[in-house]
Image: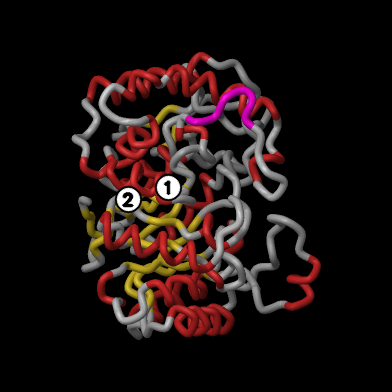
Amino acid sequence: MQYRTFPGTEIRASEVGFGTWTVSTGWWGEHSDESAIALMRRALDQHGVNFFDAADAYGNGRSERQLAEAFRGRRSEVVIGTKVGYDIYDEVAQQERRGQRELPMRTDPAFIRMAVDKCLERLETDYIDVLQLHNAKMEHVLDPALWNVMRELKKEGKIRAWGAAFGPAIGWLYESVELMKREPDINTIQMIWNVIEQHPGSAMIEAAKRHAPGCCFNVRVTHASGMLEGKYTSDTTFPENDHRRHRPRAWLVNGLQKVEALQFMTERMTLGQAALKWLLAEKAVVTALPNIYDAEQLDEFAAASDFEALPQPMLDRIQDLDAKNFGVEEDLMNYKGAMTRQNEETDADLQYPRNPSQQPPSPRQLRIVAGTR
């Protein structure tokens, strides 16, 4: 396992991390606490995976409690990231929640402090390595009090690095750009980025290089919700409680065509491993967080770190394919975040033709000035 350091800190994280969403929420199949804890310990002990990404909203604190149990007495061996911002303490909202519908958010300084203290209790620790606002929206980006309390928590030693996670769907381009402009000392951003979903992640990285050069990235949805694991077929179906079951059929059909176009990546490794190596070719990425839900998958993904980097000609070929949307004709994605400016302001980082329909630019329309690597 290779390791990378969060810029400006002493936080040394495995370049392949472990996102606890899959083992604590029930949205990727059911896991007992015992099986989740065993998988986490296997990640550290057998593979050197030391970065674990949690959130207070994952199972209403379940992911944090699992981490505490898994590594009790071994705090110095692991790097723990968690996220706050959802009001998981609102009992009425919890009772009314259905599926993956978002809970109400609270980001006032008093609530953030209370939420962090609760995280510390569940994690059985006195510090959090990486704290991020969970699924930040533009209203949060524009609130300086929120980011000031993050800085205060860092000065107090309760957290070692701070940032924001953007989601829950792909998008949120100008939320992230605006945050990096306003708070250039931000330590990290968690985003969705992968070989077949490069927009807007590539643009976010270029914006960081321009506005917040000390900002690094931890990447989730590294395999496009499993598409880049190379195991789906046109006959694949998902269980009732699996979030992928609710996606349109076109997502599977089009995704399989893109995966077919990427088979040249599998000469020396699996597609799942190559997808991680593509992410790690970007130096601004500190750790990639694949979805891990069994020991076989953990072993495969962790081993990706040991392979040599993808050769530049392969990276260039991938970029050429992305510019053509991998040869697939499909409608523009309906992003949730701010993907276009609401006025005439433009960014030097991002140049793309005006879209008269006001739809977000597709990867084929986007032009990154400085290049993506």
Q: How many residues crowd mark 1 within 10 Å: few (<14), some (14–19), many (20+)?
A: many
Is residue 177 at all visible to an observer of this figure? no
- Residue 194 lies left or right of residue 10; in this view the side is right
Which residue is identified by label 1? 290
Q: How many residues crowd mark 2 within 10 Å: few (<14), some (14–19), many (20+)?
A: many
Q: Earlier in the sequence, mark 1 or mark 2?
A: 2
Looking at the picture, the colour scheme in use is: secondary structure
From the top left corner, tell me how far across and down residue 3 is, in percent: 22, 55
Q: Which residue is at 38% across, 30% downward?
A: 271
User: CA–CA distance between discs 1 and 2?
Assistant: 8 Å
Secondary element at tag 1: loop
Which residue is identified by label 2? 16
Quarter-of-image position of residue 76:
bottom left
Q: Amino acid at mark 2?
A: Val
Q: Amino acid at mark 1?
A: Pro
**Given contact means CB atoms under 8 Å apart, are the residues at marks 1 and 2 in contact?**
yes
Measured along the vertical axis of the image, is residue 322 above or below residue 31? Answer: above
Prevailing secondary structure of the magenta residues:
loop
Q: Which residue is at 43% across, 71% downward?
A: 67
Q: Which residue is at 69% across, 50% downward?
A: 241
Secondary element at tag 2: loop
From the top left corner, tell me how far across and down residue 95 is, in percent: 78, 71
Q: Nearer the viewer, residue 150 or 74?
A: 74
Measured along the vertical axis of the image, is residue 68 above or below residue 198? Answer: below
Measured along the vertical axis of the image, is residue 345 above or below residue 44? Answer: above
Q: How many marks?
A: 2
- Residue 136 lies left or right of residue 261; in this view the side is right
From the top left corner, tell me how far across and down residue 124 is, in percent: 42, 83
Q: Which residues are magenta?
A: 231-236
